[in-house]
Amino acid sequence: MTPTQRHRVLALTPYARLLSVWQTLGIHTDHRCVRGPDTGMAMVRGRMGGSGNAFNLGEMTVTRASVVLEDGSLGHGWVAGRNKPQAELIALIDACARQQAWARRIDSELVEPLAEALEEERQQASQAAAATRVDFFTMVRGE
C-alpha cells in the first residue's frame, strides 16, 4: 500500500474506530511532536465536469501534525476538521509505517480492515440513495 493510500484511509476513518484498531495492534513507541498539531485552512479546488478547467471551490479546515520517533523516523498526518488527536495519531502511524518491522503489519492489520469498512459504508450509503431514486420522463401529447 502506498503512503498516499494509507493517509487517505486514516484521514477518512472516524477517530474512535482508528484509535480502537490502533490500540489492538499493541505497537507502543515514544514519540514527540515536531510540528503541531495545528489547525488551519486549505484551498479546495474543483474542475468543471471533472476534467475541465480548475477553479477554487472554497476553503476547508484542516489539522496537521508531524511527529518523530526515538530512532528519528518522521511521520506526518492531516485530517479534515479540527481533530488534533486524530492528526497526531495519523502522524504516529505514518512514522511507524516507515519502519520495516511494522510496515507490513500496519498495512495488513490496520489499514486494510479500515479500508474495507469505509468501502462497505460507502456501498450502504449508495444503496440508500439509490432506493430514493426517481426516474422522470416526459409524456408527449397525442395531437
Image: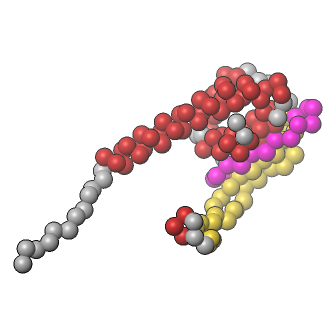
Q: Quadrant of the N terminus?
A: top right
Q: Residue 131: x, y in percent?
A: 31, 46
Q: Is residue 75 magenta?
A: yes
Q: Residue at x 65, y 45 (%)?
A: 8
Q: Nearer the viewer, residue 30 or 13?
A: 13
Whether residue 123 is situated above or below residue 44 in the rendered picture: above
Q: Position of residue 100 (x, y in %)?
A: 83, 28
- Quarter residue 116 falls in: top right
Position of residue 4 relative to residue 57, above or below, is above
Q: Quadrant of residue 5?
A: top right
On the question of residue 56 being in view, the answer is yes
Please state the total of marks drawn on the protein image: 0
Left or right? Give the position of 94 relative to 125: right
Per the rendered image, the range of residues in magenta is 69-82
Residue that lies at the very extreme toward the front in this rendered image? 143
Please give the name of the residue rendered at 88% of the width and 37% of the height, measured from the top-left corner.
73
Residue 58 appears in view: no
The image shows residue 131, relative to residue 109, as above or below, that is below
Q: Nearer the viewer, residue 96 or 64?
A: 96
When the figure is inspected, residue 118 is found, relative to residue 47, above or below; the finding is above
Colouring: secondary structure
Residue drawn at 22 percent across, 64 percent down: 137
